[in-house]
Image (cartoon, helix red, strand yellow):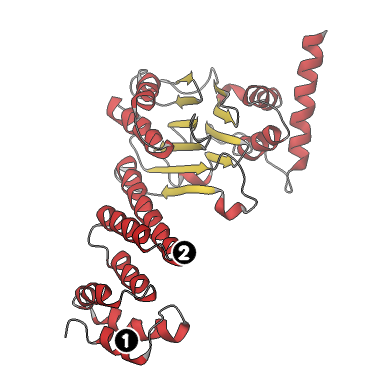
């Protein structure tokens, strides 16, 4: 009797979640598999949660990965039903575990045997489902705070390789998830090939500002080596994070902190004129004009557009330079 009540409860929860969606969600099964391999994970140190995925399908990031700060992360794939993402997050937000959430959604899905889904919640409970009709090689591995799932693989060893790579990887959650994707590809990957990849990472706890709760949101829509490209974009993302940290340090009059952050950004981004230019602007705003001039000179040597842009920043209030200071900047490198 208790088991029956539990099942009915999960079914009701799923029904509530379906009706909570603003627009009706089609439950018709698509005719093509959208995803190949993915990982959902929660960082045991920070509590951040995320999803990373690769597919031989255009723009996989539009349908497979879902995550919400303070709630959890979902990867929905194989003959994909995108509604598992928003509905899964709604159920977890209502207090259900990842395990109970997935069970409820599968119970309400007449095509559950062709779905593959991974979920992790804010407590680190992880779960995965591989329907019995998912195209071989298909399978999943559930570990401590993560789950990997794959279908349409060349070899059946891909999920185990992903799990091992994630466990052994160092660094932040995003870098560890990329390591899992790279291991899948190295193991043989999708039997069809590769095309797109995506990643989402959200904060452990919501900040009250939803636009600040997404830490990483990257997509590779169409590329001959999407995992390598995703890794490159993640590195660029880290560089721009350091630029932002430098700007914040300048706002707080922490010149030493700003220099450290800008140096880190330039180390990551290399000869990126954007990073170097705003570094110089921040130095002028901090009163370090003499130190900014050589940076401006090197940038102006690369193109006149940067020199043309500079007075416009003064007019808009983004560069705090009196006429004499502006003249010195404009003459840099001449």
Q: Nearer the viewer, residue 46 or 217?
A: 46
Residue displayed at 41% across by 84% down: 314
Using residue 243 as the reference point, say whether residue 295 is left or right of it: left
Q: Measured from the top left, where is residue 65 in percent x and y?
A: 52, 40
Frontmost residue, 62 versus 301: 301
Q: Residues within 10 Å of mark 2 (few under 14, many from 20)?
A: few
Task: Pick the residue in front: 230 or 139.
Answer: 230
Percent across and percent down for residue 16 are 78, 34
For image coordinates 32% across by 91% down, the residue present is 324
- Residue 50, compared with residue 184, is above or below; it is below
Q: Please say whether residue 185 is visible from this viewpoint.
A: yes
The C terminus lies in which quarter of the figure? bottom left
Dot 2 corresponds to which residue? 252
- Say what secondary structure mark 1 lies in: helix
Earlier in the chain: of badge 1 and badge 2, it is: 2
48 vs 167, left or right, is: right
Q: x, y (%) of residue 121? A: 60, 30
From mark 1 to mark 2, how far is it between C-alphas? 22 Å
Image quadrant containing the N terminus: top right
How many labels sit on residues? 2
Disc assigned to residue 21: none
Q: Is residue 268 above or below residue 38?
A: below
Toward which corner of the image does residue 38 lie, by quadrant? Answer: top left
Estimate how packed mark 1 is, as few (under 14), some (14 to 19) or many (20 or more) residues with alpha carbons within 10 Å.
Answer: few
Kindly identify which residue carries mark 1: 325
Q: Residue 26: image x %, image y %?
A: 67, 40
């Amino acid at each position: 009797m208790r088991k029956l009540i539990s099942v009915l409860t999960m079914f009701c929860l799923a029904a509530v979640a379906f009706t909570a969606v603003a627009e009706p969600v089609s439950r018709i099964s698509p005719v093509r598999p959208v995803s190949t391999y993915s990982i959902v994970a929660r960082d045991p140190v920070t509590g951040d949660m995320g999803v990373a995925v690769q597919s031989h399908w255009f723009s996989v990031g539009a349908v497979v990965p879902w995550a919400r700060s303070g709630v959890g992360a979902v990867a929905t794939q194989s003959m994909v039903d995108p509604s598992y993402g928003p509905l899964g997050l709604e159920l977890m937000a209502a207090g259900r575990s990842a395990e109970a959430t997935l069970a409820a959604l599968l119970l309400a899905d007449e095509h559950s045997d062709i779905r593959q889904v991974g979920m992790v919640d804010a407590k680190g409970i992880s779960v995965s489902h591989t329907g019995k009709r998912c195209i071989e090689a298909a399978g999943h591995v559930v570990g401590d705070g993560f789950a990997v799932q794959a279908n349409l693989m060349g070899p059946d060893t891909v999920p185990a390789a992903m799990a091992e790579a994630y466990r052994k990887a160092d660094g932040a959650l995003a870098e560890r998830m990329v390591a899992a994707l790279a291991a899948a590809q190295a193991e043989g990957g999708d039997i069809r090939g590769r095309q797109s990849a995506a990643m989402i990472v959200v904060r452990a706890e919501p900040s009250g500002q939803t636009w600040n709760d997404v830490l990483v949101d990257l997509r590779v829509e169409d590329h001959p080596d999407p995992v390598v490209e995703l890794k490159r974009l993640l590195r660029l993302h880290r560089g721009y994070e350091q630029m932002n940290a430098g700007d914040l340090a300048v706002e707080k009059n922490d010149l030493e902190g700003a220099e450290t952050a800008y140096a880190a950004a330039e180390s990551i981004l290399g000869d990126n004129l954007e990073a170097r230019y705003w570094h110089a602007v921040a130095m002028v705003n901090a009163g370090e004009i003499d130190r900014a001039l050589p940076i401006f000179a090197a940038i102006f040597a690369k193109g006149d557009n940067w020199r043309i842009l500079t007075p416009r920043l003064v007019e808009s209030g983004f560069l705090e330079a009196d006429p004499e200071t502006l003249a010195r900047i404009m003459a840099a490198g001449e």
